[in-house]
Every structure is written in structure tokens, then in C-alpha cells.
Image (spheres, coloured by chain):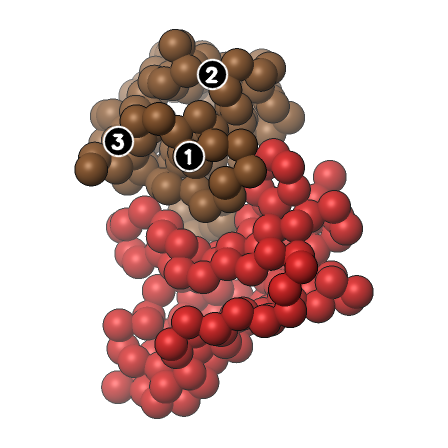
Chain colours: A red, B brown
Amino acid sequence: GENVEQHPSTLSVQEGDSAVIKCTYSDSASNYFPWYKQELGKRPQLIIDIRSNVGEKKDQRIAVTLNKTAKHFSLHITETQPEDSAVYFCAAKDAGKSTFGDGTTLTVKP
Amino acid sequence: GAGVSQSPSNKVTEKGKDVELRCDPISGHTALYWYRQSLGQGLEFLIYFQGNSAPDKSGLPSDRFSAERTGGSVSTLTIQRTQQEDSAVYLCASSPQRGADEQFFGPGTRLTVL
């Protein structure tokens, strides 16, 4: 089955700096790669996603890149703000279920 | 419109008891997922329903776990003879249709087994 590894497990940055979180996956059949943000005590919410036919996608301060050959994808957050502090999960999905990474706890220091 | 709802929000039970967790997906969503999230951990896939197809049960950790989805809508996750290691937040998510990938999560049920 699919295996998703996510790094780092914790990340601390100063407000205004950039943050990068990386994930690798094992199943070449996976074709959808979402990123979810989960604030403390709340449900995960989709912040950005990318499909296997695209190499990069950007939405304001958030971008995701995908390298299908190397089977890795990354989340980039620029100009970080304290409200970006949360746990971020990557996932890889084929036709059915999604496999999630273990999460990255991002702390943005004011 | 209403999002995914789950009940109860919190459940405390004694070891050995059975529990039922309920998920109401967004109306019209055909896909429904159950995940388990232990404290500080990621989302562990449990089971996936898609329309009238046979569910993908490959993530259920033991035969004490089962789930059903009645009428293609509401789903119930049942844990029999609960153990302390079952303590976690159980999250439900739904997606609009086959091929639509975004999952909309419910608020979860926090299960504590004493």
C-alpha cells in the first residue's frame, strides 16, 4: 500500500520568514496530493491541493510543488504570520482512500 | 449549508464496553471516510464507503471494529470490547462524488477508554 513520509515533524520560524514542509510517497498510482491545516482542537481543512498532471500550484502565500519522478511534493508558505501556526498534513490519494503523513507542527513566532 | 457532523463529540467508556460513533455527511456526498487520530499523531485510515460499492475496510485495526452506512448517508462506526489503546479522536470525512477528491471533515468524536 501507499506510504507517505512527512518532514520535518516540527518547524519554528520567525514571522515573515518562509516555511517549507516536504512529503514523499511510494505508490506511483497516487494522483492527488492535498495539504490540510489543523488548528488545535479543530478539524482538518484543505488549504491547497495538486494533481499529478501539474508541477506547481500557487494560492496567495501558499504554494505546492510536485515531482512525480522523485515521488515527492512540498508545501511552501511565504511571509508567515502567527495565524499560520498549526499542524499541517500532506496526503496522497489514488482512486479510493487517502494516506496521510504524520503531520508537521508549525510555530510562527511574532 | 451544513457541514459534516459527528456525534457524540465526546465519549468516555469503560474498558470492555461497546461504543457507537455516528457520522452525518454533507447531503449528496457519496464518499465517506473514517479516520483515527491519536494524540499528536497523523490520520490513520480506517474505512471508506463509495456509493453502493463494497467498502474498503483495509484500515480497520481488528475485528472489534466495524462500520456501516445506511441508505448511502449516515454512517456508524462500532468498536466492540473497547481497549485503552482505542482512545483517540475519530474523524469522519465526506466527498461529493467519485473522482472529486477534496474531503470535508467533521469535528470528530473524542473517545476515552478508562
Looking at the image, do the residues carrying marks 1 and 3 touch, with CB atoms under 8 Å apart?
A: no
In three-dimensional space, the C-alpha distance between marks 1 and 3, rounded to whole angstroms, equals: 15 Å
Asked whether the viewer can see residue B33, the reply is no
From the viewer's side, name the closer residue of B107 and A94. Answer: A94
In three-dimensional space, the C-alpha distance between marks 2 and 3, rounded to whole angstroms, equals: 16 Å
Badge 2 marks a residue whose secondary structure is: strand
Q: Which mark is residue B67?
A: 2
Quadrant in which the N terminus of chain A is drawn: top right
Q: Name the residue at 74% across, 63% down.
A: A68
Q: Name the residue at 59% across, 71% down.
A: A56
Badge 1 marks a residue whose secondary structure is: loop
Quadrant in which the C terminus of chain A is drawn: bottom left
Looking at the image, do the residues carrying marks 1 and 2 touch, with CB atoms under 8 Å apart?
A: no
Badge 3 marks a residue whose secondary structure is: strand
* Residues behind callouts 1 and 3 on a single chain: yes
1 or 2: tag closer to the N-terminus:
2
Q: Which residue is mark 3?
A: B5
Q: Position of residue A96 (x, y in %)?
A: 61, 34
Position above or below: B99 against A48: above
Characterize the local packing of mark 3: few (<14), some (14-19) or many (20 or more) Cα atoms within 10 angstroms. many
From the viewer's perspective, is B14 left or right of A102?
Answer: left
Q: Which residue is mark 1?
A: B96
Characterize the local packing of mark 2: few (<14), some (14-19) or many (20 or more) Cα atoms within 10 angstroms. many
Q: Position of residue A76 (x, y in %)?
A: 50, 76
Which residue is most to the left? B1
Asked whether the viewer can see residue A31, the reply is yes
The three-letter code of the residue at mark 2 reads: Ala
Q: Quadrant of residue A109?
A: bottom left
Q: Position of residue B11 (x, y in %)?
A: 26, 26
Q: Name the residue at 43% across, 66% down.
A: A105
